[in-house]
Image (cartoon, helix red, strand yellow):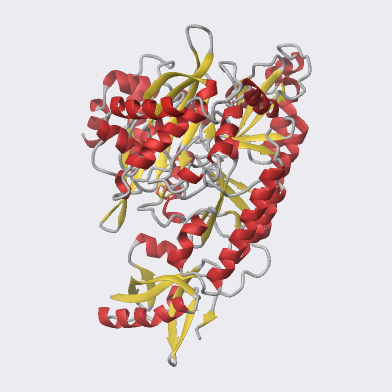
Amino acid sequence: MYQYDRFDHQMVRERVAQFRGQVARRLNGELTEDEFKPLRLRNGVYLQLHAYMLRVAIPYGLLASRQLRKLAHIARRYDKGYGHFSTRQNIQYNWPRLDEVPDILAELAEVEMHTIQTSGNCIRNTTADHLAGVAVDEIEDPRPYCELVRQWSTFHPEFNWLPRKFKIAISGGAQDRAALAYHDIGLRLVKNDAGEIGFEVMVGGGLGRTPMIAKTIREFLPKQHLLSYLEAILRVYNMLGRRDNIFKARIKILVHEHGIEKIRELVEADWEATRDGALALRDEDIAGFKAFFAPPPYETLPANDSGLAQQLESDPAFARWHGNAVIAHRVPGYAAVDISLKTGVQAPGDVTDDQMDAIADLADRYSFGQIRVNHRQNLLFADVRQSDLHALWQALVDLDLATPNNGKLTDIISCPGMDFCSLATARSIPVALDLQRRFEDLDHLYDLGDLTLNISGCINACAHHHAGNIGILGVNKKGEELYQLLLGGSSRNDASIGAITGPGFAPDAIVGAVEDVLAVYLERREGPEETFLEVYRRLGDQPFKERLYG
Amino acid sequence: MAHRVITGSLLREGTIAYLRVENGCRRWIATLGEATHVADKDAAETLLAEAIADVEANLIVAPYVADIRVEDRAVDGITMRERIRAAGPTIPLPSGDRRRGARGDEERRAA
Ligand code: SF4
């Protein structure tokens, strides 16, 4: 993974010192809250419902074990003993004190971490396919390009105060696992007819109040022009983006109002003038970044481990977990492993300090000391020997982290909702926990097939509720919580925005409403292999509405 | 019966605080039940205006008037948001409510 050079170290240390001074001046009154707020947001510090919240960047979701141990230490020393992984592959602490945040930042800097680009109207932390480098369908590893984008965007003077936040995601697989269509810019590594690898560039996707699917602005961008093209898009957005209305300030509105053709014309014109300038990447530049993400020292192993076959035969619980959590790997004898943070007893994405420490130890033992965070709020070991899977599973069982629900209904994305978030209109975590309890029977869960369910506590849609096959949006109606149901969303290659079924449901009725929807699915599917989304697309929403509102 | 309290967040800690006025002295306390509550809107606005001094004294952030309900001496927020602010998250925290050392300063005496 990327290693800081002396400039990175210096930059991050200086940033910590700068924020320490800003906090001191806020506490002694030299800065008012209005003056301080944009500064704290620049450092990932929000003031939430019960306390400050600190968001720590995990660039493209990649963590070393020593970094995860540091995150555990921070949870233990400065917070309430846990952290919350978000859909942006970051981690959030819900209870830090403001006067201790500079110390936390100093501790993070020791392990090459920070909170830069986790908040504010800047280019945010770039996200990526969590299977980067190991996916069997991968065209090219996206991580070197994520790191290039990170270095280009951090403290970019021209784009430091954009009209609104700006999110970029990069995927290298044939299948989109990074929700590209819902980002301000989505970059998909593709191969052109000449066999060259470059990027399909999508722009103007987003969720929130006005969900939109990104449109392709360029079918094929040669790799050497990645940064110059991004810069052209950002420049057009920075000039034309609406600063008069926060709800219309994202690039998706610009694309919608002007049309993709017009935006393309502007971007291409800007790019033509700058493409061969200082940002043009040379092959050796790209090679230098690729070197940081060279494959770990894999052993030469048989494609199928014979011991594993026996363990699968003799241990049904292991076999069940294996069938769900273990993901095919491009290197013979290895596998990737999903570590579910959807245990049904703690909020989706939550993990305790002790669990973090234990996961770090397991990563050292079984996965070259690295951990990934995916955008569905789970963790992943990317490089596990097949012969180690049984031992790893046993260790995860002991940690309550072996729930085999990867990609199933209870693998719920949930935002913090009104239990923590000051913008929330309703709670989301209790609904997630109720649903997980209701569907804890694994036979029933597996019978429902692959299914995504996402719950947001307000229209800001941090949990991507429009992109879930089933989405739930908590709203406030006359002071009471009400839950709208959306059906038909997807964040994959076939991205689609879920449609609201009709009037919302009371907190004690929303789980029943989901059950009704699933009953229609089970009755109307043509076979167990037809997924919920396929049935919904085949039948439309009418049968579901009839059952819900009959 | 509808009443009103003044509430905000402690600047240093970020935790929720309610205004209690005792013998003309302002304190910011952690529990809604012990906050000073007033029935009419004007009295609440007067209290809020006084609380601004504690913003300037760097004790409190973003104080506002919150509506509460008082029934049989039990006090609670009217909106779900205020009820959660008063009672804490409605879900158990993964590590219980464990926190290192003294969290300190739940009460701060105003100057
Ligand atoms: S969706 Fe709304 S409630 Fe949920 S975390 Fe985002 S802003 Fe908060």
Give residue A383's quadrant in the image. Answer: top right
Q: Residue at x 50, y 42 (%)?
A: A124
Give residue A288's quadrant in the image. Answer: top right
Q: Residue furthest top?
A: A194
Q: Residue furthest bottom?
A: B23
Q: Nearer the viewer, residue B52 or A487?
A: B52
Q: Is residue B29 above or below residue A180?
A: below
The quarter of the picture where the N terminus of chain A appears is top right
Q: Position of residue A321 (x, y in %)?
A: 62, 27
Q: Is residue A183 visible?
A: no
Q: Position of residue A312 (x, y in %)?
A: 68, 19
Q: Is residue B25 visible?
A: yes
Q: Position of residue A287 (x, y in %)?
A: 66, 23
Q: Residue at x 35, y 29 (%)?
A: A213
Q: Nearer the viewer, residue A401 or B57?
A: B57
- On screen, residue A382 versus residue B70, left or right, reads right
Q: Residue at x 73, y 16 (%)?
A: A310
Q: Position of residue A30 (x, y in %)?
A: 52, 73
Give residue A101's quadrant in the image. Answer: bottom right
- On screen, residue A383 versus residue A543, left or right, reads right
Q: Is residue A273 above or below residue A114?
A: above
The quarter of the picture where the C terminus of chain A appears is top left
- On screen, residue A123 versus residue A151, left or right, reads left
Q: How many marks?
A: 0
